[in-house]
Structure formats: structure tokens, C-alpha cells
Image (tube, rainbow, N blue to C red):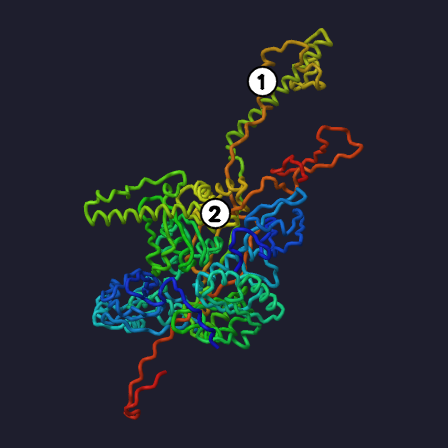
Amino acid sequence: MWSTAREIAAGDTVIIWLTRELVQPLVVTPGKDFNSKFGNYRHSDFVGMPYGSKVGSRTGKGFIHVLRPTPELWTLALPHRTQILYIADISLIISYLDIRRGSRVIEAGTGSGSFSHSVARSIGSSGHLWSYEFHEARAKKAKEEFAQHGMSDIVTLTHQNVCKDGFNLTDTVDSVFLDLPAPWDAVEHAKQALRKDRTTRICCFSPCMEQVLRTVSALNDAGFSDITMYETLVRPQDVSPIPVLQSINDVADKLKKAEGIREIKRLRQIAAGQRHNSNNNNDPHGEKRKRTSSDGEQEVPLVADGEDSGNGKRLKTDDEDMMDDVLEDSAAPAATPAKISLSKTIPEVRGHTSYLTFATLLPSMPIPPAAPTAAQGASPSQGF
Amino acid sequence: MNASTSTAEFNTRASSVQSGNTILLRLPNGDPKAVKIDKDCNVSLGRLGSFYANELINEPFGRTYDIIDKKLTLIPPRSLAEVEDTDATNEYINDGQFVQPLTLEEIQALKQSGAHASEIIKMQIEQHANYSLKTEYSKEKYKKRKEAKYSKSFTTIEPTLFNVCEYWFKKDQTRIRDIRVDTLSQILNMANIRPGGRYLAVDDASGLLVSGILERMGGSGRLITIGNSDSPPAYPVMVNMNFTAETVAPLSSLNWATADQSHTPLVPPVDVAPDQIKSERQKSRLNKRKAATDLLFSIREELFAGEFDALVVASEYEPFSIVEKLVPYLAGSASIVVQSPYGQILSELHSKLRALPGYLCPSVTEVWLRRYQVLPGRTHPTMNTSGTGGFILHAIKIYDDENANAITSFRRQKPTATSSSSSSGKIIIASDTLDASMEDADE
């Protein structure tokens, strides 16, 4: 499909990874430039680089990654012409329909070719995909892309309305995938196209339950068995290292310390106020007594910051030393906490893509040999 | 109009039952059972009885058979019955009442007389005190339960990867590390497993990953697995796949010692002087030993030559040690896919990979799957469902460029005529990026 060489060559389709949300295809064409908000690049710079290289911009700021295309990256990078299938549905369908090397598969409609590339990858050069698209412009675009990606030998794209006109195939394919608004209209055509000599499978991809119910009816009427239905989704995880959770005992200790500090500060302010008063007034107790309120509560005098606070102008008492220590302890920054990696599902996830209705067509019952009758005479029985 | 068939149609396994296969049969109660099919032998199915294995050989998969006198009769497939809505309710149906007058002895006698399951069930229904009161849905359920109990039929299950994975998941999901069908499918797609690809795998999930990879390689390409024992790894899931020899041929195995580039495996001597060889038997033994040693060393060389397309891991061991060891042997742009039953294991791995330059966009996802019963008038999600399919981490190996700067890195402003002569002429505009550097912007 795409290049398997180690290095990028002119003409290769590559995948440019800018960010998780910005992934785009590029055909390496020497002479052309690639400019983006992550820098400026010349296509010719990519030639000769190994796939998977991180490339710095010519301006020195910004970089991109140049990757080898895979169907999964193509699904992220492809230009959407329709709503597309993503990896969860694609991978489950491929598994259930038993698509592998050599498989013969029908797909309708082609859409933007997301599913088509996955099928082509899995069936290899000995398998075949018949893909049908009823919209002419989209069919043309898909055909171009298949050709560009080296898929023309294994994919036959037909511009056709399969509900009206069928698949033009009989007893040929191992599996059928229908992504159509009214898949029940294509069920009989699908049955005709499927092989009858072994178990074959079908998948109908529909967003609404009403479509599922109608499809189940049609499949049952057509003789399919083991009809079942699945939904599948992906839940991306947000991983972040966070500090180890703190115990409430530590929090309680901190609060208690804070209480202690507040008390110390309060007492200091009182002490400072007292010194202030004794400095201004020879009676150390007088003013204080006068200030005592009637209910015995002591008021805390307001003392301006810096005034008579424990500075170098006088020696500290033992009590004041201890208070300072506690204040310093509480002011010291905590040691960097250990971290653990935690994950949780991202806040917004895709809630629904479509229901996948699967069914099986069992190999035809063997025809019992016809008993020769007298009327037929001696001629051997005809083949059926 | 039929398309022309391609030249050689490769199949990873036969499309019909073959002698030597271990195949899955679905019993009347819905449970799958693995049985060995050997030519000219009998297959025993316990209560259902036994039958001649030859009856199944060359039969396509998916058919249902009745066992009568050890021979098999093909039963045509049944379609879903349209069940009509009636006014019946369970208003007057009381539990605990004796409703089934057929005694155990009577039922045993019927069974022994060779009465077909349908006859036994018919008699039970006729004698059932409350049967007519039931809703049509309830009647269907009753009949289905009785069929599961009395019928002597089974259905062959095709050994597709989906069916085999589902069988193992129901049987014992811890042995396959919770890898459910959707998990396995996504792993194989994320790793771009395809015919002709070259892969490294660490499979402690009973060989489920290996089976998936070999199936999708279709006999073309290469798969080297690394495990923890010095004897060849047992991959029991592969038994149920019934692969052809060509499908398994691309597989080789090493262990963590023989896969170590800095270690030379100790092997018994192979070079013995010709005059020392005492017997033909000894000679043949030496030749075998030499072949095994040559093979071991050639597999090692192949691993060390690298450029593998993907690494797939489902292991009991610490995953970063595995990734770190094997990523040098991957090509650029190769996928690294690691599965674990536990999100915490992959969160740790994610944090480690994110901090290193050689891994692009590590991401962890959880898989979610819901199955519905789709029966006319009775469509709803299944009552029993799987709680977990594990978690997947995906990253892409890249070749780092140390000189490349992020778009938000420190910018250098060119010195102007009016600027003061600071030694470097740089005016720093701070940014919040992690990998900003102070290097000269001009090349």
C-alpha cells in the first residue's frame, strides 16, 4: 500500500504529526514547501530521512514528526467527505467478519475510505475488496486515493446504488459490510453475493435503533442466523502525576500549628503593647488596668508593625525565642512531596458511533441425491 | 459476474473440520466445549452421548447436528420466531406451586425409551398447570430452557480469532489477562499487524496475542517472541486456532537472557574432532545440537539487526523494562502497544514514556463493549455482560532531534543599534515550555 522502505523518498505519502489533534497527510514533492504554525519546511528536506523522524523547522522554532502511513494514522489524517469509522468499530468489525489474508470482502458505501484502508491492509495482495459508493464525486475521490496508495489491484471501486442495483456478484465473497441508511434493502443482494459453500458473515452499521430492528427483521427473513448486535467505544485516559494525597492528620497538625501561631502573635502584640505603655508611662500597670473593660476582658492594644516588635534593639526573652522558632517553622516551605501517576477517563468521551448488527449465513444444506424413478428409465440422474 | 480468483489462496486454517483439529462445539445450553477430532476415533460429549469423529471430517463449520446412534444428522437452521403480543400477564401465576406433574421417574423413562427431546418437551408443556397462562415470550423462554436441558444436538464453531478469543475469555479471562475480543482487535490494528510485517511480541496471555498476530500475518512475515523460560513457550490458545504449519512457520522464540545483546548464551559444545566421534548416534546428536545452536544465534542476530514494525506486549512483568529493552530493535514510526488488566500499571508506564524523547504521544485507553439481544419484541442489552477488557497503551517510536526547538521556546531578539551592549545581545522573553533552550536560532 505505502512505502516499506526505511527512508522517505520523493513521491511518498507521509503523515505529518503536528499535535494529537493535528495529523495530516502529505505527498513529498521536492520543490514544494510545507508551512504551518509549527514552522516552515521544504519537502526536499524530508527525502532521505528515516520514517519516524522529528524534524526541526528551518526557522529554528517549532518541529514536526514525519511518520509512515498506516490505516490507523490515515483514519486520523484523512480529509473527511462523510462521517467516518474509527478504530474501535473498524477493528471489531474486521475481527467479527474474520477478515484476513486472502479474504474477499464487499463494502458499501465507500464514504471517505477509512474502513477501506483497514480492509486492504488485512486482506493483502491475495484478497479482494469490492467497494461501492453511490455519490459520484466521492466515488471518484476515493478511487484516486486508492490508486495513490497502491491499492488499485486489490480494491474494485464501483459507482453504484447497491440497494437498487445490487453488487453484481454471486457466490463470491466471504463477508459484507453495509454502512448505508437502509441496509435492509441490500440484504437480499448481499445474500446473493456471499459464498454458499462455507459460513459467511455480514455486518450492518446503523446509528439508530429503529434501523437495527428493521435490519434484524430483514436478515431473519433472508435466512441469516446468529443475529446479534454490539456497541463498542473507547475511553481515553487522562494520566497526570499528582502529589501523594495528604492525610487529614497532617492537615489537623497544620491547623493546630496555625492556631498556636495566631496565639503567639496575639501575646506578642500584647507584650509589645505593654512595653510601649511602660516606655511612655512609669506606671507599668496603670494604663493596662484602666483599659481593662468592665467584663474583665483584656483588650489587645493596636501596635503599629515594626514598632517594638522583637528587633535587634533589645535582647529577647526565652519565651520570645521559642515563639520565634515556632514562627520560623511554620514559615519554612514544605519539602517537595512524592508524586504518583493517576489516570481517569477524560471528561468528554464519544458516547455513540453506531450499532453493529452482525449475522451469519450458514453453508447451504447439502442437496440429498434424487432417487431414480421408474419413469426416468436407465439414464443417470442429472446434476443439480 | 464472478471476479477471477487470485492465484494461490492462502488460508491460515482449513475451512472445514480436519483430523487432528481441536474444535469448539456449542452445546444445547449455549456453552462451548473443546473436543479433539481424530480420524477413526469417537468423540464423547458426556450427557449428549458420543459420535464417530469421521462424521465431522470435511464438514464446513457452523452446522448443527443431532446425535443418533453415534451418527450425526444435519439439522437445518431455525429462524427467529415472531412472537405475538397477547394479553397474558403473570398476575395469576404463583411461584412455589407444584406445576410440573411429570415425575422424575417418568422423565427418565421417556429419555431411556429414546424419545426425542421435542417429544419430552411437548409432554411437559401439555401437563404444565400454568403454561397456558404464560405470555408468549415466557413460553418461548420456557421451551428454550427445556431444549437446552433435553436436546442432544450441537453446533460446530468456526475457529476464527473472534470465536476463539471469546471462548477463552468466557472460560478463564485471567489466563488471557482480560484481553477481550474488542481489546485484541484494537491491539492488532494499532500495531498495524498485516501480511509480510515483522513483529516483536511478549505474550504472557496464553498465546492469545501470538495467535492474533499469526492469523493476521497469514503465513508471511516474521514474529519473534520473548518469554521467561528456557524451553519453548506453551501457547495453549494456538491449539484452538488449528493453524496450518505454514501459518506458524514465521514464529520464533527467545527468552530474556538469549535476547540480551550483551550476553552470549552458554551452549553445549558442537565442535568435536572427527576422531573423537564414537558412534553414528553421537554424530546425529551433535548435528542436532549444532542445528539448534545455529538457529538460536541466527534468531538473535535477526533481533539485533532491528527495524521491526511493531512491539506488542501483554506481560506479567514490569512493562517499562520490556519497552526499554526492545525499543532499540524497532524501526522509526513503529507502534508500541502494551496491554494490561490494570490502568495503574499503564499510568506509570505513560508517565515514564512521556518524559523521554523517543516516544511520540503515549496514550492510554480503556475499551468498552456492550452486546444486545436482538429478538423481535425483546431487544435489549444482554443481562450478563463483561465488566472489563483491560487497558491499552499506544506510542510511536521516533528518532529525536536534539536541535529542534518547540515553537514556544525562548526567542532571541536581534540586537538593534540603540540597545545597550550586553555581552550576548539577547533579550529574553520568558515562556512556559519545558524543553526551551538557549541555543542560537540561526543555523
Residue A177 drawn at (x, y percent)? 49, 67
Indicate whether B420 appears above or below A306: below
> Would you say A277 lies left or right of B393 here?
right
As rendered, which of B212 and B178 lies closer to the eye?
B212
As rendered, which of A3 and A255 lies closer to the eye?
A3
Q: Is residue A141 among what the camera can see? A: yes
Q: Residues within 10 Å of mark 1 (few under 14, many from 20)?
A: few
Foreground tag (2 vs 1)? 2
> Would you say A209 lies left or right of B109 here?
right
Q: Are marks 2 and 1 in contact (CB under 8 Å)?
A: no
Residue A172 lies in quadrant: bottom left
Q: Chain of mark 2?
A: B
Q: Is residue B86 among what the camera can see? A: no
Question: Which residue is disc 1 drawn over?
Answer: A325
> Would you say B158 lies left or right of B367 here?
left
At x 50%, y 30%, the residue is: A249
Name the quadrant of the C terminus of chain B. Answer: top right
Q: Chain of mark 1?
A: A
Give me the C-alpha separation between circle 2 and circle 1: 59 Å
Identified by mark 2, the residue type is Leu
Residue A178 drawn at (x, y percent)? 51, 68
**Secondary structure category for the residue under label 2:** strand
Question: Which residue is disc 2 drawn over?
Answer: B330
Indicate whether B303 appears above or below B164: above
Question: In the image, are marks 2 and 1 on the same chain?
Answer: no
Identified by mark 1, the residue type is Asp
At x 61%, y 70%, the residue is: A135
